[in-house]
Amino acid sequence: MWYQTEVTEKCGIQFPIIQAGMAGSTTPELVANVSEMGGLGTIGAGYMSPERLDEEIQQVKRLTSKPFAVNLFVPESFDYTEAAVDDMNDHLQSYREVLGLETPKPAAHDEDVFKRQIDVVIAHEVPVCSFTFGVPSTEIVTRLTAAGTVLIGSATTVAEAQAVAHAGLDMVVAQGSEAGGHRAAFQQEGTTSLVGTMTLVPQIVDSVTIPVIAAGGIMDGRGWVASHVLGAAGVQLGTAFLTTKESAMKPVQKQAILNSVETDTVVTKVLSGKAARGLRNPLIDDLENVNDKVLPYPIQNDLTKQIRATAAQAGNVDWTHTWSGQGARLARETEVKQFIHQFITEAQLQVDRLNV
């Protein structure tokens, strides 16, 4: 069949459909149901402690015996001053007063946590591990490969894809600028490497020998087939899964996506310190006005996440984050299994038309 590619072969799945590792928005049910339908569900473990990751993996394994993945954030270097933290906290104080929150301090962000996450992945013999924000060290790649884990990197440019391939990873996600959530860029600023999916995929395909997975703006079967024609061996979807019933995204955020249009998103660093695409709202507009005070990731994320989480829980979409790609008009309010069934049916219909 046309959909049997190197991705299905390497990952041991039926369809080359990967659910993006959306940190904070995945649930064991979401991951397991994607895998049960023949795709590759992914635990978004970027912000998880090793102990929490251990629990999540066990929960997914109780729900499915099919292959699944864990997505991790590669640690990055960053620098900040206490004075800068105080300055940003002062600006955010009015939000905290309304929400009844204490003033936070930056977390430790010990690189040892990442290494312990890797230990958990190996201990549980997780079939696939994907990485965002960079390439893991040679030592980690060697350990995971020796454990039989399939490795997937992420790239927003040809040069980044070549770095992923050079590091010995098995596949690379080509993240187009249409994609929602954090930009995977690691060689240049995420707000500048905004290359569209249809432009990026064929250039990466021509530049590396490992399988390429298309991501960004793919919301239905048409996007899958278009990516396949461009040379992609698979597709990765994020926003399309955010509005499913199994997603951990809060109802107010799901409705914001379902009610939005393609021009409502913006790529901004002000919420987390790292470029991400989401729906523009008053909190983003306010912080853009003091852009010079925004701290680097993950420190800015530490200072705003409590506000965003509390606001989302309270149904206040103006003060939270709603990560979303530009394909928002195509978002569906449905269950995972129904969505994937429709996605596959739509793709096959397009293939049949092309073969006429």
Image: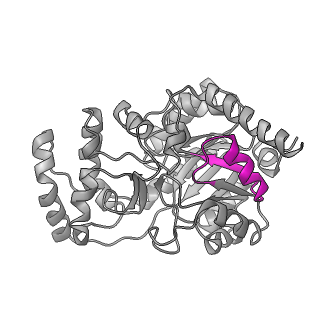
Q: Nearer the viewer, residue 209 or 48?
A: 209
Q: Residue at x 79, y 37 (%)?
A: 348
Is residue 18 left or right of 183 when viewed as pictured?
right
Q: Locate the C terminus and report the quarter of the image it occupies.
A: top right
Q: Residue at x 78, y 55 (%)?
A: 229
Q: Determine whether 2 is above or below 267 in the image.
A: above
Q: Indicate the position of residue 291 as horizontal and vertical percent values.
A: 25, 68
The relative height of residue 339 versus residue 205 in the rendered view (above or below) is above
- The N terminus is located in which quarter? top right
Magenta span includes 155: no
Numbered marks: total: 0
Name the residue nearer the viewer: 133 or 328: 328
Looking at the rendering, the stretch of residues picked out in magenta corresponds to 215-237
Specify the quadrant of the image occupied by residue 134.
Answer: bottom right
Taking the spot 62% from the left edge, 39% from the top edge, the residue there is 124
Q: From what the image shows, is residue 176 above or below residue 191?
A: above
Residue 309: tell me if it is visible: yes
Image coords of residue 99 (percent x, y): 15, 40
